[in-house]
Image: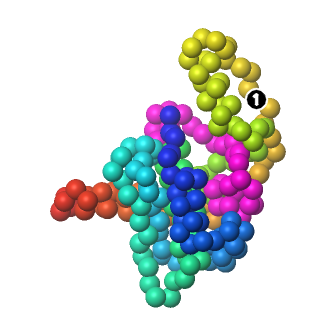
Amino acid sequence: MAASKNVGQALEWVRAVFGVTWDAWYDEAFAVPPGAEGVRFLPYVTGERAPVFDPRAAGAWTGLRSDHGRGHLLRAALEGVAFALGGCLDALAARGVCVDEVLLAGGGSTDPRWRQLLADVTGARLLEAPAVDASARGAALLAGLATGQLAMPQPAIRGAVLAAPGSDQQAYAAMADAHGDLYRRLRQRRRGDPR
């Protein structure tokens, strides 16, 4: 399982801290180029279970300069969450589970610019989930399977393709290692590791 604690929760925290609406957030963030001109965000504001499996993990913005504005911080927050999701897919791939399609549901998946960023960072095609309450339905399905109350269902009908990896995929691929390295370096400092 690769369930991140800090996707919607981290983004909602950022939104509340800046007092910005989702529409304003997307407009400001996507006025900034990919990579947020060097600003990075670690979304681990409540510890994390995937992809870093560290209950003491903490969030951070790094790379700030005086010529950066709120839009850079907002863009970096979206990218940081996307990199964390990409890390979850990488963790699955390391265990032999290749994910090349992801179902999206909920309000955070409605802006096409955000969907494209997710597709570019994760390298996965994003499909529309057939139900708005996909998380609750998925949890109920897993419980039914685990208790033997349900048999394995037939594959669900997939919705429309919302986004596919595009022209920014290569640039984000080059940034992914730096994102993971940032977490590792901050963890070492927190633990007093001089490396």
- 163 relative to 102, above or below: below
Q: Position of residue 64 (x, y in %)?
A: 44, 79
Indicate yes or no whether the magenta region holds residue 111. yes
Circle 1 residue: 156
Q: Position of residue 40 (x, y in %)?
A: 47, 69
> Camera-side residue: 165 or 147?
147
What amino acid type is highlighted by mark number 1?
Answer: Ala
**Residue located 43% across and 43% down the image:** 49
Q: Which residues are magenta?
A: 90-119
Give the quarter of the image for residue 25: bottom right
Is residue 138 something one can see in this rendering? yes
Crowding near the residue tagged with mark 1, few <14, some 14–19, many ≥20 C-alpha atoms within 10 Å: few
**Residue located 65% across and 24% down the image:** 141
Q: Is residue 112 left or right of residue 19?
A: right
Q: Position of residue 115 (x, y in %)?
A: 69, 57
Indicate yes or no whether the magenta region holds residue 102. yes
Q: Position of residue 112 (x, y in %)?
A: 75, 60
Helix or strand or loop: what does disc 1 sit on?
A: loop
Q: Is residue 63 left or right of residue 80?
A: left
Quarter the C terminus occupies = bottom left
**Residue located 67% across and 13% down the image:** 151
Q: Is residue 45 left or right of residue 36?
A: left
**Residue located 44% across and 70% down the image:** 61
Q: Is residue 191 left or right of residue 41?
A: left
- 190 relative to 141, above or below: below
